[in-house]
Amino acid sequence: MAMSYSRLTQLRLSLKHFRRSCTSTSNTRPTAGISQIAKLGNDKAEVEKKKEEEDRVTYELPKAMYAENKKTVFQLFSSQKNYAIEVISVLNAIEFSPYGVKKAWSDWKEDKLVRSQLYVKERAEFLGPEIATGHFICFRGGKVRFYGHKDWIVEDPDSDIIPNLPRFYLESYKMEAVDCSKMTLVYEGLENMKNMEKLKWLSLESCPRIDDWCLDRISGEFCDTLEYLDIRNCPLVTDKGIASLSKMKKLKTLLVGGHPEAKNLELVCLMLEDVLPELTIRGILYCDESLLTNDEAHE
Amino acid sequence: MFKRAITGVQLKPWLKSKYLVQSLSFPVRSFCNSQKKYSNKGDESDKPLSNVVPDFQSELFEETRCPPLTQPLKPFLHPIKRSFDYLGITGRNDPQTHNNLYFPRHCDIVIIGGGIMGCSIAYWLKQRGHDNGLRVIVVERDPNYTRASTVLSVGGLRQQFSLPENIQMSLFGAEFLRNAKRLLSGENLEGPDVQFHPYGYLFLATQKGADQLMENHKLQTSLGAKIKLFSPYKLKEKFPWINTDGVELASFGQENEGWFDPWALLNGFRNKAIELGVEFVKADTVGFETEDTLVHSKPGVGESFNYNKLKRVHVRLTNGEVRTIDFSLCVMAAGAQSGEVSKLAGIGIGTGLLRKALPVEPRKRYVYCFHAPDGPGLDCPLTVDTTGSYFRREGLGGHYIAGKSPTANEEPGIANLDVDYTFFDQQVWPEIAQRVPGFENIKLKSAWSGYYDYNTFDQNAVIGSHPYHGNLMFATGFSGHGIQHAPAVGKAIMELVVDGRFIDIDLKRFGFERILTNHPVFEQNIV
């Protein structure tokens, strides 16, 4: 049977990429391309890079194949992406109804808050993770304390400077305690507190935006080192978040209280104390003495 | 009219119907019996292709013939009764009148299946195409979701996969769940409380699987997931209730892993979609109608040709009436029944590109709930044992949930959702009791079963359009881990529809083409 294909189809079928579609196991992957490279005697890194490139599936024809790309001035204005739908989105950005305007305003404020707390890679690279966290927390109204220093480092309310906080990388500065009480820290902001080696003390008292996801992040981040955690008056925390603190094996003191959403707070705290033997939880009243009758109270 | 085949002209991959953007890049689809319609100077002579797989070669010459699907249907409406309905003479509360007046007869996008995938896709599409920009209809035959896989699922969220696409989709899913309350809220609508339990996933591996686990771990951490590896000694230190016999390596997800409430997420998506203007139709899909459509020629590339394009879907309402909905694009998100419904569109019963059916079929899986007073405490993650059984804590009262994927020859029948308790006694309980000595003393409380939309080809999703039916997109075949990928898949389909390509997460590898070219994409270690 005569195999008649268009020239295009033949070329596409002959392209290496056609067969390099979707296997992930090395048994079925054709090895023609890789052995050719190995024969050239390149080092392993290049071979792996080539393997990676070949693994990536490309189904697009080389552009020279079709005579679409006429060289005109108007090509400067053409783009791959069809921007028509973006134009409509921009024109419909704010719905002019009471709800729409309120929503747009609150979305904008939320976006502003999150963007002000995003993780800045350059800051952490320049200052090192410990001092970068110190800068992040103190500039937003918190307090930090390093090992070997007795005093808390806090922003001076009158002026804008933060005394005693180094502005360069110093190896000896390791964070011991962070006090974020009453700060509006969001989930994205907690990313700034990563890679700290020996954090022992953390207070998130009265932070209105701390919820179960934030506690999940904290317990995942500081599971090996944290010994004191204070989450009083965080209204969004439920018993699921408190239960996730069971990952922190070294936790010695936990302060809870003021969680209207946590329906089974006492039970969770009891079970938490079961799992973490060194833990004492303060702020929980397991037994309400006023409910006992006179005889029981005297026992 | 229906028996037209593609003769003579080649089916070019970059020529799609006139409704889609021209700068699409599609995988190779030009497998036809073609003769050269044009010849360029300096053409290569016809020579046999040597590097094509032999069994594929024979199939390249097949014509793609779409079999006759359904007869065109025009629902008959009695003219006098119709006039009475329009004039309001018959009662408006009559469902028949409601159907006659308000049943949608055409739309831009019809989504078959109103489970988590269907609702997610509807939400993302409508959110991008403002108000009346896109008309989206979701055809769901059971709005109470009595047999839907979504509401019967265990609701796990994990990033511990071995394919980068799956990991990225789970990471996006976690981010979406975190913001679900805000994103899915609206005027008069409160966002869902997905009740995320951040307790992590623990995978145990024997000596054989340890290497694969370490490779997976490298990939997962490089994409941003926080997973930690444990040796048996450290594992015993962290989880004293575990028996580490036979465990060589364990990987524990420390962040963004756990389980959530799929019913809440489904309702969140559905209610927000309804608020944005998606129409939900309670009907069963019974057929598709095609129309001979002209695909335009592209200069320098190829000539125009005709093919059978899907134009209309026939749906049967609860009262037995069959109605039609014209659409421009169809999304197949029917879950476990996707394979059957795709057959109605000719996929699997034609020739050429339509020769392979969508390999998604329902597979029944059991989930058992028991009480164990000596079981692990608050730190019990969703533990997947080396044998494949899994268990997790449920609530705070000492209840646990367990299950296992049966082997190929033990597959239960799919006729109904009855539970087989002997499977628990013989298979699941011995294995979890061996792993956790505290599970030796238990009392089985209840159980339920649900269907996996099981992809028999490689147990991974099928996402993307069909090679022949360019306006039929699949979002199905998740084989047990669909619920956590739902937000990401919805967004991916939305990008495919509106922008023509995947932007956020590249899911090209999950396309339908791999089924035709027989290149499976396997996931190592699945539940």
Image (spheres, coloured by chain):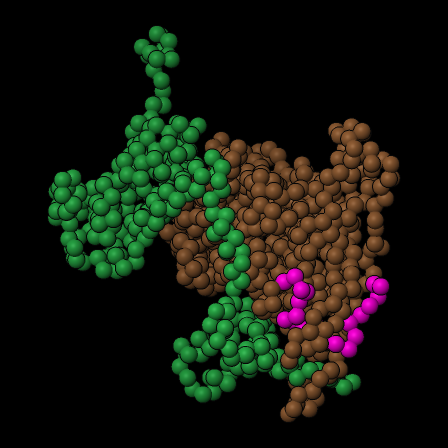
Query: Does the rendering let one see residue B474?
Result: yes
Which quarter shows the N terminus of chain A?
bottom right
| Residue at (47, 52) in percent of width and height | A90
Q: According to the colouring, which chain is green?
A: A
Q: Position of residue B110 (x, y in %)?
A: 68, 50
B402 lies above or below A238: below
Which quarter shows the C terminus of chain A?
top left
Q: Closest to the observer: B123 or A2?
A: B123
Q: Position of residue B215 (x, y in %)?
A: 45, 64
Q: Residue furthest top?
A: A294
Q: Closest to the observer: A199 or A289?
A: A199
Query: Does the rendering let one see residue B423?
Result: no
Q: Position of residue B520 (x, y in %)?
A: 62, 66
Q: Position of residue B278 (x, y in %)?
A: 62, 44
B390 lies above or below B353: above
Q: According to the colouring, which chain is brown?
A: B
* Number of numbered discs overlaid on the protein picture: 0
Q: Specify whether residue B18 is painted magenta.
A: yes
Q: Magenta stretch: dominant SS?
A: loop
The quadrant where residue A120 appears: bottom left
Q: Closest to the observer: A31 or A2?
A: A2
Left or right of B364, for residue B63: right
| Residue at (44, 75) in percent of width and height | A49
| Residue at (80, 29) in percent of width and height | B89
Left or right of A60, for residue B318: right
Magenta-colored span = B1-20
| Residue at (68, 65) in percent of width and height | B17
Left or right of B1, for residue B231: left
Q: Specify whether residue B7 is painted magenta.
A: yes
The quadrant where residue B140 appears: top right
Left or right of B4, for residue A276: left
A68 lies above or below B368: below
